[in-house]
Amino acid sequence: MEPEHRMQGWVRQAVRAAVLDAWAVLLPAECSGCGRPDRALCAACAAALRADPRPSVRGELTVWSAVDYSDVTGRVLVAFKDGGRTDAAPALAAALSVAVAAALAATADAEPGILLVTVPSSRQAWRARGFHPVDLLLARGGLRPAALLRPAGRVADQVGLGRDQRLDNRRGSLVAARDLTGCRIVLVDDIVTTGATLREAARAIRHAGGEVVGAATVAETRRHHPDNSRSPETD
């Protein structure tokens, strides 16, 4: 039966490739990770987004990230968030779902009552995009975030800022939408760098009486000076 299974696998791959080729004739596209023509996300770039969740620490917060930040990850995320490439959502959503599952499993008691809370987009980003990127990714993974945070003031572009400057820039920029006494929360975002954004979200939640038990992101990077090509929303 093994040769038959292999043959079926080859047939499925051939059919999938043929469908993609036909689709590319009708709606030409290029891979959002590497620019390869006629593919929304090529196999190599999809493999770069395959989740292997690992924890990192930002302040008092443990963050589980699905992948290490790379050029491919950055290009795909920016294309998804700012370039209208929602065709990358399935791969990004799959990676984020694994990171969320890891963050939940790492809690002392993974109760079903733990809430997922995303960092809200700025009003300017919402007007430009028309959607909240991380909320959309969670929805694609069958997860529903709780809208418990809202912006409390303007935040300067984070690009080019050092660690302390990012923390100062974000401080006081978020506020809880209601009293959160008794709520246990896992924060969710797209990328963590210095942790300024997630730490500000955790501060706002704790100030409202909630407990942050962990965080999850698609990607994690230790770089303190990200490329200008990255979204200004990125931490």
Image: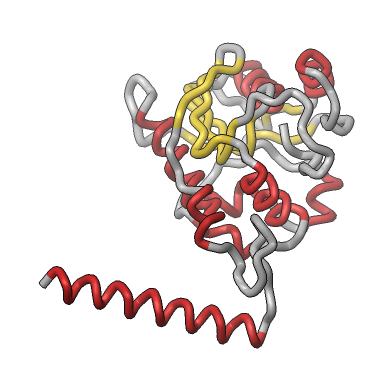
- Which residue is painted at 51% across and 30% down in the image? 186
Where in the figure is residue 21, as x and y percent of width and height?
56, 82
User: What is the quadrant of the C terminus in the image?
Assistant: top right
Where in the figure is residue 225, as x and y percent of width and height?
78, 27
Give the left or right position of residue 148, taking residue 49 as reference. Answer: right
Where in the figure is residue 201, as x and y percent of width and height?
66, 26
Q: From where the camera sits, is residue 211 visible? A: no
- Which residue is painted at 54% across and 17% down in the image? 57
Q: From where the camera sits, is residue 144 visible? A: yes
100 vs 12: above or below: above
177 vs 126: above or below: above
Near-viewer residue (178 or 217):
217
100 vs 158: above or below: below
Give the left or right position of residue 223, taking residue 69 as reference. Answer: right
Where in the figure is residue 209, as x and y percent of width and height?
58, 18
Near-viewer residue (14 or 65):
14
User: What is the quadrant of the N terminus in the image?
Assistant: bottom left
Looking at this rendering, what residue extends furthest in the left direction? 1
Q: How is the image coloured?
A: secondary structure
The image quarter in which residue 128 lies: bottom right
141 vs 169: above or below: below
Near-viewer residue (112 or 126):
126
The image quarter in which residue 177 lies: top right
The image quarter in which residue 196 lies: top right
Give the left or right position of residue 123, taking residue 8 as reference. Answer: right
- Which residue is painted at 58% across and 63% down in the image? 41
